Amino acid sequence: MKTTEAMIFAAGLGTRLRPLTDSMPKALVPVCGKPLLQIVIDRLVSFGIRDIVVNVHHFAGMIEDYLASHPVPGVKVRISDEREQLMDTGGGILHAENLLGADRFLVHNVDIISDLNLEWLDSSVRSDALATLAVSDRKTSRYLLFDDDMRLKGWTNISTGEVRSPYPDLDPSRCRRYAFSGIHIISHDIFGAFRDKGFCGKFPIMDFYLRAAAEYPVYGAVPEKLELADVGKPETLARAREMSCIEKLCRF
């Protein structure tokens, strides 16, 4: 893989997983006896990633202690400290700029469990891409909208009819509609793009993508098959334990 650096979003409050997250960070919630953070780290390492940044906020000390007591040989894990303010996904990336030095890096939500082939995603990155988002054709209320070349054009909430796009005349019915996986590969050029578009402080990365997509190429990549669980809620946490790939993921 050309991508050898990654950032794991582990700073969230995990409010949807209460009461579990009243006493621990979401990142350390176990699935089949293994913390979510360790599942993601092991997945990244299995694809050759050796430089990992983990952001922390909620129960930050517990995550730091866990990482210190569970080192992975040959892997550098650094902390992006958001104790003073939770920066959200886009702000979290910007806050970690000094820790992310590679030409491109992978970003992975800690509460996403999947069998996504990260080597395939890496090979899907186009030379002009500011970001490449792993997406899939699964049922949800909120979808990203792409043209036939899989370039991002907008977002829609099919429950409310809301559409967001940098293209004022976008017709969602003429777009390809996919759900975001919470996994993306981003060019280091994004930091200049953040500044160019006036993004600073706390902000969601999707807000940036949806404002910048007309000027900066953001693409979607659709795997042929994908088993994925967003374990941010108790019911999906239970569902993750039944995934066909979970035994392999927890065996690393």
Image: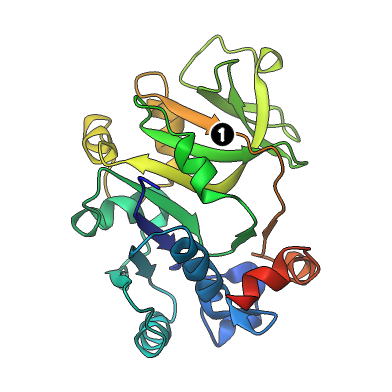
Query: What's under tag 1, amino acid-wise?
Result: Ala
Q: Residue 58: x and y, percent?
A: 44, 76
Q: Position of residue 246 (x, y in %)?
A: 71, 68
Relative to the observer, which residue lies in front, 94 or 184? 184
Depth check: give the residue in front, 94 or 100: 100
54 in relation to 105, above or below = below
Q: Give me the residue at 37% from left, 67% from top.
A: 54
- Drawn side of residue 186 relative to residue 196, left or right: right
> In the picture provided, is 111 more to the left or to the right than 207?
right
The residue shown at (65%, 77%) is 18
Secondary structure of the residue carrying numbered label 1: strand
**Quarter the C terminus occupies:** bottom right
How many discs appear?
1
Q: For this view, does 250 lie left or right of residue 53?
A: right
Q: Classify 136 as above or below 145.
A: below
Q: Residue furthest left?
A: 98
Q: Name the residue under label 1.
A: 221
Q: Which of 218 and 26 is in front in this view?
A: 218
Which percent across, then down, holds residue 161?
71, 27
Rendered view: 160 above or below 229: above
Q: In this view, does 71 lie above or below 190?
A: below
Q: Quadrant of residue 179?
A: top right
- Does residue 182 appear left or right of residue 71 in this picture? right
Q: Which residue is drawn at 66% across and 65% down?
A: 231
Q: Residue at x 37, y 57 (%)?
A: 6
Task: Indicate the position of residue 131 as horizontal and vertical percent values.
Answer: 41, 35
